[in-house]
Amino acid sequence: MTITLHTWNTPNGRKISVALEEMELPYTVKTVNIGKGEQFEPDFLRISPNNKIPAIVDPDGPGGQPVSIFESGAILLYLGEKTGKFLPPSLRDRIPVLEWLMWQMGGFGPMPGQVHHFRAIESEVDRRYGLKRYSDETHRLYGVLDRRLAEVEFVAGELSIADFAILGWAWRHERHQVELDRYPNVKRWYNVLSARPGVKRGFAARLDETVA
Ligand SMILES: N[C@@H](CCC(=O)N[C@@H](CS)C(=O)NCC(=O)O)C(=O)O
């Protein structure tokens, strides 16, 4: 009984394919082409009422009953709880995981996501303010991450679901116009994670019609 991952080839989608691969959980991908509006189809809205990927369906949820989950942070916490991997059992050790996971969900995703959006605006007048505002904020966040990673190997100390969440967005650093050379500790962390076989499989997984 495998998990179904409803997703598309985006940073939020890649967080979950990476986590599933790292946790060695078997899964099948059901693509939701958000460019064609498939996220608004009633069957998908039943499991993801905010019309966004990713979502999962686990036929073997709590109590052996099926469960569906939307919001990538909630999915990562669920998978960590389910497997006991990348989510420490002790509340004290779990605090930095929660802090950095929430940091990603609230900022290091929404902000670079706005850079992607404003870069695509044709009108210079419409683009200028938003692109500067969100680029500045994105760089501030990379600075915060860089200072954290100067102190610890992974954001919560040990490798955790928070790293997978942040990695999904760092994977798109070129698209939000960030050079990792400016953030040497982020670069070190990014290269260490990218070399992991599970992470490689998570990024190689086919999440749309074009990515092999
Ligand atoms: N907070 C959500 C954000 C998910 C999200 O923004 N998904 C985008 C793709 S990366 C999406 O499905 N967009 C489709 C839409 O907004 O209609 C999460 O982390 O799961």
Image (spheres, rainbow, N blue to C red):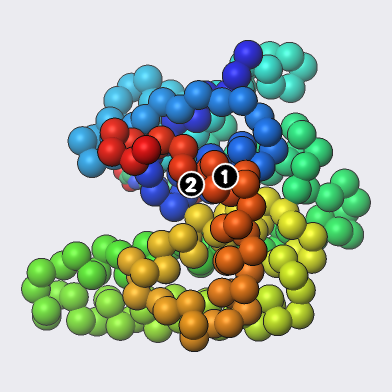
Identify which residue is drawn at 68% across, 76% down.
149
Q: Nearer the viewer, residue 94 or 194?
A: 194
Residue 146, disc: none
In the visual, does 116 lie left or right of 107?
Answer: left
* Label 2, ligand 1: CB separation under 8 Å: no
Determine the residue positioned at 44% across, 52% down. 11
Percent from the top left, x then y, of residue 28?
A: 50, 24
What residue sits right under mark 1 in the picture?
A: 18
Quarter of the figure with residue 75: top right
Check disc 2 and give the amino acid type. Phe
Label placed on residue 203: 2
For image coordinates 56% across by 26% down, the residue present is: 27
Mark 2–mark 1 distance (CA, rounded to whole Å): 7 Å
Please state which amino acid type lies under the numbered disc 1. Answer: Val
Mark 1 C-beta closer than 8 Å to ligand 1: no
* Residue 44 at x, y percent in the picture: 39, 26
